[in-house]
Image: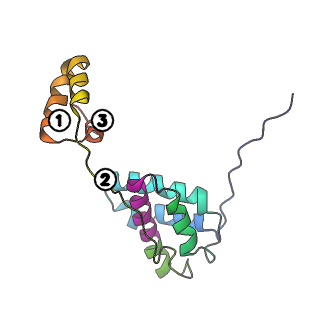
């Protein structure tokens, strides 16, 4: 029976861009942010570490970062968070001479053309019919313009 190929994690060397990202994640500049910011930035920075972290810290350039951001074009929110986090990595790395040039200089994100999409009547009717006690929350959210994605993330007492 043939062996399945294993997933190999690249070794992080001190000269790699991944080491620059890791240094930022372990820095006071990262830990001074709110827990929510840390959570979202960490998620996007780990993704960047996987995709562009293998480049050397002196060969990483805006074109590579922009290509990474373009890969997130279907997710404008993630793209914006990733660019913001990578700019903070640049800020800390440049003053410590870890990068030869800012990796995010000139990088842009697409952004969303849409915006808030209100609840349609079918969704409200389905929620009111099948959600039990939660149906009142759905009715209230639809009437005050609360987004569906925000309802999913609410913490209930």
Between 59 and 124, the one nearer to me in the picture:
124
Which residue is denoted by mark 1 in the rendering? 142
Residue under the image location 33 percent in, 51 percent down: 36
Q: Looking at the picture, tell me which residue is in the foreground, 150 or 109.
A: 109
Query: Residue 5, located in which quarter of the rendered image?
Result: top right
| Mark 2 or mark 3: whose residue is earlier in sequence | 2
* Residue 74 pos. (x, y %): 46, 52
- Any part of residue 50 in sight: yes
Q: Residue furthest right?
A: 1
- Along the line of sight, which residue is nearer the eye, 111 or 20? 111
Residue 110, given in percent of the width and then of the height, sits at: 41, 63
Q: Residue at x 86, y 32 (%)?
A: 2
| Circle 3 SS class | helix
Q: Which colour scheme is used?
A: rainbow
Q: Which of marks 1 and 3 is nearer the N terminus?
A: 1
Q: Distance between the residues labelled 1 and 3?
A: 14 Å
The residue labelled by disc 3 is 152
Q: What stretch is highlighted in magenta?
A: 73-89
Which disc, if any, is residue 114?
Answer: 2
- Relative to residue 6, is residue 124 depicted above or below? above
Pick the front one: 157 or 148: 148
| Residue depth check, mark 1 versus mark 2: number of the one nearer the observer | 2
Q: Where is 129 relative to 76, above or below?
A: above
The answer to whether residue 28 is visible is no
Badge 2 density bin: few <14, some 14–19, many ≥20, Cα 10 Å: few
- Assign the magenta stretch its main secondary structure: helix
Q: Residues within 10 Å of mark 1 (few under 14, many from 20)?
A: some
Quarter location, residue 53: bottom right
Which residue occupies 21% across, 30% down?
121
């Amino acid at each position: 029976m043939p062996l399945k190929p294993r997933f190999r994690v690249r070794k992080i060397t001190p000269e790699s861009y991944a080491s620059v990202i890791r240094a930022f994640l372990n820095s006071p500049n990262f830990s001074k942010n709110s827990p929510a910011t840390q959570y979202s930035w960490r998620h996007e920075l780990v993704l960047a570490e996987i995709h562009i972290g293998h480049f050397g810290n002196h060969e990483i350039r805006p074109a590579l970062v922009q290509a990474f951001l373009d890969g997130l074009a279907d997710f404008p929110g993630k793209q914006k968070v990733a660019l913001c986090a990578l700019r903070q990595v640049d800020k800390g790395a440049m003053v410590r001479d870890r990068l030869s040039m800012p990796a995010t200089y000139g990088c842009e994100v697409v952004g969303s053309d849409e915006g808030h999409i209100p609840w349609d009547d079918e969704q409200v009717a389905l929620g009111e019919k099948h959600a039990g006690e939660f149906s009142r929350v759905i009715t209230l959210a639809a009437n005050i313009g609360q987004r569906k994605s925000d309802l999913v993330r609410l913490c209930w007492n």
